[in-house]
Image (spheres, grey):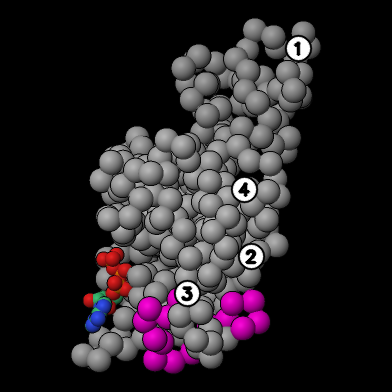
Amino acid sequence: MDVTPGTTGDAGHGAASITLEGIRKRYPDGTEAVRKLSLEVKAGELAVLIGPSGCGKSTVLRMINRLIEPTDGRILLGDDDVTRVDPVKLRRRIGYVIQNVGLFPHQTVSANVATVPALLGWPRERTRRRVDELLDLVGLDPAQFGRRYPHELSGGQRQRVGVARALAADPVVLLMDEPFSAVDPIVRTRLQEEFLRLQAEVRKTIVLVTHDLDEAVRLGDRIAVLSEGGRLEQYDTPAAILGSPASPFVREFVGADRGIRRLAVTPVTRAVLDPLPVGGGADLPAVPLGGSAYDALGVLLTSAAEHALVTEDGHPVGLLSRDRVLGLGAVAS
Ligand SMILES: Nc1ncnc2c1ncn2[C@@H]1O[C@H](COP(=O)(O)OP(=O)(O)OP(=O)(O)O)[C@@H](O)[C@H]1O
């Protein structure tokens, strides 16, 4: 996954904001899948759409790349109204990753990743370099995997090829519909971690649909909780969604264990520390400043200590009490 920053040519400056203005989708049979949704995703941010089955998540995603035409409203990429541009050209600017990836089974991994560059008529050498660079970026050795066919890969490897393919032509936006749901939980966690590293590298504007709240909390800069008809219940950071649900619907949706989930996204900061004791507290268990409150609680519980020593670059900076950590997980009810 290691690349020199900038070699992909897209370290952030290839991203565009996405603005949904009162979008609506009424299917021909009369189903109002999305009634009136407004939402803005800032350039370089990852927004997660989450909500119960059938609430309109996929419909929203597919309106952004016009696989589904909105009945009403506007969708802007940066300042461009996507409903006014040719949908085929539009889709070349938007990467799309779906569950089970949808790789072409009779094409090699390299040919799959090269799909959009080939459509754009890139010279062969440029395409080859880009394909190798992307396979490296998603952690697949091009020499080993480039000539394989999709059925010769594991589920997790196929997902990575799907991500590489979506990034190939340096899209301004990436849409991901349940991209990690087809793999087992352990592989999923690893792919999510790799994906976060990749996103720190490429800084695309991403809209990701998931059913999995843990995934939403782990990956999202912001989470949009939707209810039936694409109604926006809350759009905020993971910590705010878990800490202050805006409606009974969100409270129920994020569930009773949201205090624990909240600890996972709350860092230990100087603001919650007590002063160091005389003698330095060297016998106490240590936790790093900036680490998650969830990890700190784990250390406190396993060592049965009332306090942990918080360190920065190995130097003690203060004490963290168990009560303080539990207070960080407390949520408005
Ligand atoms: N082509 C269609 N014609 C009529 N209704 C449709 C069509 N596609 C989707 N719907 C309906 O629109 C609503 C929203 O569907 P959508 O697939 O966007 O939901 P979702 O939130 O992505 O669901 P899931 O989480 O189950 O994938 C559902 O009630 C669905 O039955």
- Residue 174 image position (x, y, % from top left): 51, 63
Q: Is residue 135 above or below residue 59?
A: above
Q: Are marks 3 and 1 in contact (CB under 8 Å)?
A: no
Cα separation between marks 4 and 3: 23 Å
Which residue is painted at 27% across and 55% down in the image? 105
Q: Tell me the amino acid under the disc marked 1.
A: Gly
Q: Secondary structure at mark 2?
A: loop
Residue segment shown in magenta: 65-80
User: Mark 3 belongs to which amino acid?
Assistant: Arg
Q: Which mark is residue 91?
A: 3
Q: Cα distance, mark 1 to mark 2?
A: 47 Å
User: Residue 280: which numbered mark, if any?
Assistant: 1
Q: Is mark 3 within 8 Å of ligand 1?
A: no
Give residue 332's position: percent from left, percent from top: 50, 53
Question: Would you say residue 145 is visible in this rendering?
Answer: yes
> Where, by quadrant of the figure, is residue 233 drawn?
bottom left
Mark identifier at residue 15: 2
Q: Which mark is residue 172?
A: none
Residue 67 falls within the magenta-colored stretch: yes
Q: Nearer the viewer, residue 102 or 228?
A: 102
Q: Which comes sooner in the sequence, label 4 or label 3?
A: 3
In the picture of the structure, the residue carrying the numbered disc 4 is 200
Whether the magenta-drawn stretch holds residue 329 is answered as no
Image position of 308 with respect to 330: above or below: above
- Of callouts 1 and 4, the N-terminal one: 4
Q: Closer to the camera: disc 1 or disc 2? A: 2
